[in-house]
Image: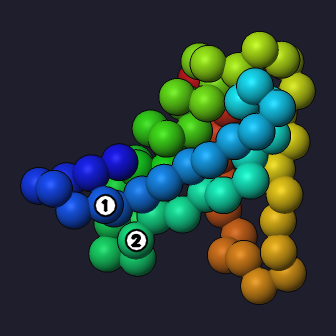
Amino acid sequence: MYENGDLIGVIATRSEGNSIISFFVHGKYQRKGIERKLFEVILKNSTSELITVNSVPYATETFINLDL
């Protein structure tokens, strides 16, 4: 996702959109709905009802309400 030509967020998948492998939003833009918008693109384009997420121990905890 870009704002005024600046990259502010990215989400990357594999396995036809069924596995999230990278999900980052610049700290300045967090808690503004960017994460939700990126995730909604994945939900819309996934070919599966199950989406997996690879995580790392030092990742920031995030909660997403899936009751869209």
Q: Is residue 50 above or below residue 6?
A: above
Q: Are marks 1 and 2 in contact (CB under 8 Å)?
A: yes
Residue under label 2? 26
Task: Specify few, some or many for label 1: CA neighbours under 10 Å numbering under 14, 14-19, or 20 or more.
Answer: few
Q: Quadrant of residue 63?
A: bottom right
Residue at x 46% of width, y 64% of height: 25
The residue shown at (52%, 28%) is 41
Residue 31 seen in the current view: no
- Mark linked to residue 7: 1
- Near mark 2 (Cα within 10 A), the count class, few <14, some 14-19 or many ≥20, is few
Q: Nearer the viewer, mark 1 or mark 2?
A: 1
Residue 4 in view (yes/no):
yes
Looking at the image, is mark 1 or mark 2 earlier in the sequence?
1
Please report the residue visible at 35 percent of the width from the left and 48 percent of the height from the top.
1
How many numbered circles does the render carry?
2
Give the structural element (helix, strand or loop) at label 1.
strand
Q: Is residue 4 left or right of residue 58?
A: left
Q: Would residue 30 be found to the left or right of residue 14 on screen?
A: left
The foreground one among 40 and 17 is 17
Write the residue at 72% across / 77% down. 59
Residue 67 point in image, percent of width and height: 65, 26
59 to the left or right of 41: right
| Whole-percent x, y for residue 46 in the image | 71, 21
- Callout 2 amino acid: His
In the picture, measured across the screen, residue 8 lies left or right of residue 10, that is left
Residue 28, given in percent of the width and then of the height, sits at 31, 75
* The C terminus: image quadrant: top right
Q: CA distance from mark 1 to mark 2?
A: 8 Å
Q: Amino acid at mark 1?
A: Leu
